Structure formats: structure tokens, C-alpha cells
Image (tube, grey):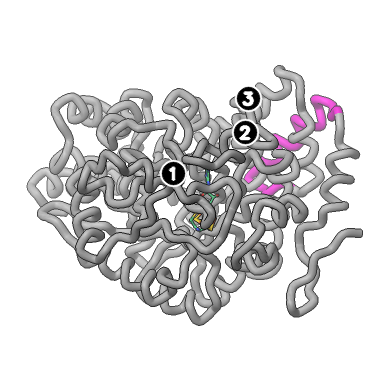
Amino acid sequence: MFWVRDKANQKSFIKEDEIFKLLEETKSPSRSKVRDIIQKSLSKERLDPGEVATLLNVEDDETLEEIFEGARTLKKNIYGNRIVLFAPLYIGNKCINDCEYCGFRSSNREIFRNTLSFEQLEKEVKALEDKGHKRLILVYGEHPDYNADFIAKTVETVYKTKNKNGEIRRVNINAAPQTIDDYKKIKEMGIGTFQIFQETYYYQTYKKVHPKGPKSSYIWRLYGLDRAIAAGIDDVGIGALFGLYDYKFEVMGLIYHTIHFEERFGFGPHTISFPRMEPALNTPLSEQPPYLVNDNEFKKIVAILRLAVPYTGLILTAREPSHIRNEILKLGVSQIDAGSNIGIGAYSTEDQEAYKKSQFTLGDQRSLDAVINELAIEGYLPSFCTACYRMGRTGEHFMEFAIPGFVKRFCTPNAILTLLEYVQDYAPENTRVSIEKRIKEELKDMDEGPIKDKLLERIDLVKAGKR
Ligand code: SAM
Ligand code: SF4
């Protein structure tokens, strides 16, 4: 048995032998078995590792189509048409790690190193607010300059930078794993989710692609979000970088990680991310990922994650081109970024050299408005809602899942109101037309009664300028 141990001599919850065994034992599953598993998921139960392995072993197109259909149904039944929108904001690309796939790796001499000053940060936030954004994820390399005090100060700066119509209402973080005391400093500033991606759950590959720096410790990273929860941060986001190792193993890793949280804390991760590796400047591994995931496999990964952990938010980023995003969205994604620019300082300066400060290349470069317009035309309900966070409720996606009627009572009306704010404050004519049409359709589908009456009242208030 292969185990890795942390300082307390605690076994890792990633059981490699068990994962390989399950993937072997469940090969060539019957269609009826797969159907039973899909049914279990549709009755809102988290799947067990053996069931997830069974779904991963489906290879024929017809049964795969049933998995996709199951994921689409689950999304529709539980989460409805809403898609939550956010933008990434890169704070600095200095890094002491040397992750072989990342443009920010310390040995990359072709990248311009840069950290936003607090003045530049304000400019970036204003530029994002001017476009209509309400939710950001702040992204940092790992460097002594980006310690917890610095991260906390950047969060504080974002919240206090307000524009005529705009304010950022929820700040999430993607940064290096911290100590419990450091997480506490960051939590105090009122963050939403803290994200850490394990990149690969396969220990040997992990060690190989993280040759130096703090990130070379698999265990420090694996238990990074346990420490966040111990510090009081309930919304944590996990993820794997697809392309480093076999996708089936990585999906199993994400499931084991989820079960570990459930067992230890009584709740699972708030979100799961599944980035595919993208080419990064002067970074050979990223040009040729050792376990390239094709588009069909990617669809399969997302659909299986949707079915496996029905209560968790799924995040799809603009690493993917728009045509892939449109297809994957239907399979159960709950959040996407839009109008993203990952060059440091690039939102406010239109810096022509920004790509030389970027971590990798973005596949979807549409503006926020273009994404909103297309989502509305496709029948989605783009949402800037941050009500759960502001009401002090953690686990917004879990609420949507677990509390009967929550989506109808809170999420859909709030999505409509935040979208209407966008129409009033930012949208050009063509988007205005498609959003108003979309809102009318949503209202038509709503049951008559006090919830709808209250919503109609509030719509009038937003139209009159109240926010
Ligand atoms: N430096 C911190 C860390 O590594 O956890 C946080 C920020 S890092 C810039 C955010 C994530 O970007 C990483 O966790 C990794 O999954 C992803 N990433 C790195 N290189 C990538 C690439 N070439 N393509 C796609 N995603 C990449
Ligand atoms: Fe640094 Fe994160 Fe990039 Fe690794 S993934 S080189 S830690 S920024």
C-alpha cells in the first residue's frame, strides 16, 4: 500500500491503491448499472467512489449521452437557468515555486514580474466595476511579498473601492496555502471562497512537476483547505489541473477530497474547478500536456462531477474557448468568469505587453457584455447575486441544493434583480433588449403569489434607481 504521511504521521485520504482497484473493477459497466447510478444522483445523493469509477469507465457514445442527459436534468432541476458571473483579478506574478506548467514559475526568465501597487489595484477594481462586475477572484503567485497581511490589505482595498454605480460585493481568493493564523487574518477582511487546486492528486506526478519551493510538499497543499476551515473559512474550493495525469484518477481524487471534508467537517467543498492546461509563455510542459484531455473527455469529466457531487458549485473558466463553454455550461456549471483579462494591470491600462505578464493564454476573450447577451439569448439567467454572502450565509450552492424552494424563493428573484441593475447601469441597447426579453420569460414561468408580487415591487424600485 502506498501512503504519504504528514507531520502528524496522518495518512493521506487519497488512497491510490483503492482508486486504481476501483477503476479496474468497474470496467465495461452495463447500461442498467449506469442508469441506476444516474438515478441515485438525480435523487440528490452524492455518489460513492465505486459509482464514480463506474461512470468514468463508460466509453460508448450512447451510454455517455445518458450521462450527459442526467447531468443536464440535474442542473435544470436543482439550479435552474442561473449562471453566476465573476472576473479574475491577478494581483502579482512573483513566485518562488517552479511548477513546470505555469508561466509564473520561478525559472521562467521571459515573463515580466510585476505586482499591482494599491493605487493600480484601485484602478483595476474601478475598471471592473465600470463594466458591471460584482464578484472577483483575486489571484496571487506564491511569494514572501504576498503574505497574509498583504493579501488581507488587497481584499480590504477591493471592498472599499467604489464607483458611481459599482461596488465589488464578494471577493474570493486563489492563493498559496496558509497557516491557520494567516487564514484568520484574511478571513477577517470578509472573503468569500478560498480556492486551492491540488493540481494532481497523483503523488509521483505531483512531486515531479513541483520540483522546488513550498508547493513541492504534497501534504501541505492537500491539507491546505482543512486549515482554512479550521480558521473559520467555510467556503472552500478544490480543483485539479487536467493534463498532468490520467483524468479518471484526478476525478477520483476530487471525490476523495470531497468525502474527506464531509467526514471531517460535515460539509463538502463549496466549489470544484477543473481547468485544462493551457499554453503558457516559454513553458514547454504547458504546450504538450502529458495527459491531454480532449473535448469529449472534458465533457465527460464535467458531467460526471455534476452527478457525483450534486450539491457543489462547478466553475468553468475562460481558459476554454466560447464554443466549448457553451456546450459545457448545460452540463451543470454554476459559475463562469466573463470579460476576463489575466494580464497584470491589464483591465485599466490596456497594456499591449500584458500577455508577457500572464500565466497562460485565455480561450474566451469575449467582453462581459457579449457573454451576458449570449447567455440571455440562449435562455440562461446571468446573475450577479451575492445575497448569501452579504446575509452571512456560507455555502450558497449548498443552500440552493439542500433547501426545498430556495432557488425559487431567493436565487431566481435575486438573479433577476441583479441583472436588471446591470441593464439600468451598464448594458448597451442590444443587450438590454435580450435581457428584458429573458426577464419577461422568467416572470412568465414564475408561480403567481407573494414571491412574485414582492419581486415585481422590487423591479419597480430598481427601475426607479434603488440598488
Ligand atoms: N499560486 C497559487 C497556486 O499555485 O496555488 C495560486 C494562483 S495559480 C496562478 C492558480 C491556478 O492556475 C493553479 O492552481 C493552476 O491550477 C492554474 N494554472 C497554472 N498554470 C496553468 C496553465 N498553464 N493552464 C491552465 N491553468 C494553469
Ligand atoms: Fe507559482 Fe502558482 Fe504558478 Fe505554481 S501555479 S508557479 S505556485 S503562480
- Mark 1 surroundings within 10 Å by alpha-carbon count, few (fewer than 14), some (14 through 19), many (20 or more): many
Provide the residue designation for mark 1. Answer: 335
| Residue 111 image point, x, y percent | 42, 48
What residue sits right under mark 3 in the picture?
Answer: 296
For label 3, count other residues whose C-alpha is less than 10 Å away and answer few (under 14), some (14-19) or many (20+): few
The residue wearing badge 2 is: 288
The amino acid pointed to by label 3 is Asn
The N terminus is located in which quarter? Answer: bottom right
Q: Which residues are magenta?
A: 28-47
Horizontally, is 314 left or right of 458 in the view? right
Does the stretch in magenta take in 32? Answer: yes
Where residue 59 sits, quadrant-wise, is top right
* Of pointers 2 and 1, the one earlier in the residue sequence: 2
Label 3 to label 1, Cα distance in Å?
21 Å
Is label 2 within 8 A of ligand 1 (CB to nearest ligand atom)?
Answer: no
The furthest residue to the front: 109
Q: Could you say whether the residue bearing mark 1 is in a helix, strand or loop?
A: strand
**Type of amino acid at the residue the image marks with label 1:** Gln
Nearest the viewer among 85 and 436 is: 85
Q: Is residue 404 visible?
A: no
Q: On the picture, is 341 further left or further right than 130? A: right
Q: Residue 296 in the image: state x and y as whole percent.
A: 63, 25
Q: Image quarter for residue 375?
A: top left
- Front one among 425 and 116: 116
Q: Position of residue 318 (x, y in %)?
A: 43, 37
| For marks 2 and 3 on the same chain, the one whose residue lies earlier in the sequence | 2
Q: Nearer the viewer, mark 2 or mark 3?
A: 2
Quadrant that contains the C terminus: bottom left
Labels 2 & 1 near each other (Cβ < 8 A): no
Which of the two residues, 249 or 262, is positioned nearer the viewer here? 249
Q: Is residue 423 above or below residue 207?
A: above
